[in-house]
Amino acid sequence: MKRSLLLCLVLTLAAGCDRDMMSERGFALPEGDATAGEDAFLYMQCNQCHSIAGVELPTVPGYDPYVELGGKVTRVKTYGQLVTAIINPSHKLAAGYAEEQVSEEGGESRMYNYNRYMTVQELTDLVMFLQPHYDVVVPTFKYPIYP
């Protein structure tokens, strides 16, 4: 009896560890600097494809930004969502755009992956630059009027 109870306890603990291995709990990056984030945005030429609602950015010759970041949204853009969008752009493609604009054949994002070149500081600075440009608004619903 003791042996089966011990085995059950060990299996339960092992299963619990396995499930939380990819947990985001305990994950926190240092605070970034919004001014340095804007510099990183321009240095990495994110403005080739991205504009930011309400922000005047220089254009990159030969490119016309087609994915707008920021602006009015109905859900908070969390720190984690922005980090994920930058380091894993294929995780969730931008909604509301033609598929050929935002993805390559096979569903991969067209966004360049900077993971081998971007520092953690540049990542946190980018997030600190982008996050304040999202304006969370209450969604509007049009209810049908029945006669």
Image (spheres, grey):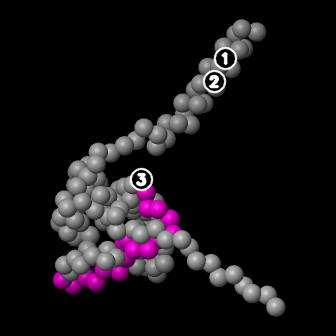
The amino acid type found where label 1 is placed reads Leu
Q: Is residue 77 magenta?
A: yes
Above-or-below relation of 8 to 27: above
Q: Position of residue 14 (x, y in %)?
A: 58, 26
The location of residue 18, given as percent across then percent down, is: 54, 33
Q: Residues within 10 Å of mark 1 (few under 14, many from 20)?
A: few
Q: Are marks 1 and 3 in contact (CB under 8 Å)?
A: no
* Dot 1 or dot 3, earlier in sequence: 1
Of discs 3 and 2, which sits in the foreground?
Answer: 3
Question: In the rendered structure, which amino acid carries the disc numbered 3?
Answer: Gly
User: In the rendered structure, which segment of residues is drawn in magenta?
Assistant: 60-78
Task: Inspect the image, locate mark 2, and give the three-letter code of the amino acid beneath it.
Answer: Leu
The 10 Å Cα crowd at callout 3, few under 14, some 14 to 19, many 20 or more, is: some
- For the N terminus, the quadrant is top right
- Using residue 44 as the reference point, say whether residue 101 is left or right of it: right
- Looking at the rendered structure, which numbered label has been put on residue 17? none
Residue that label 1 marks: 7
Give yes or no for residue 30 being in the magenta stretch.
no
Looking at the picture, tell me which residue is in the foreground, 2 or 71. 71
Residue 11, numbered label: 2
Camera-side residue: 2 or 134?
A: 134
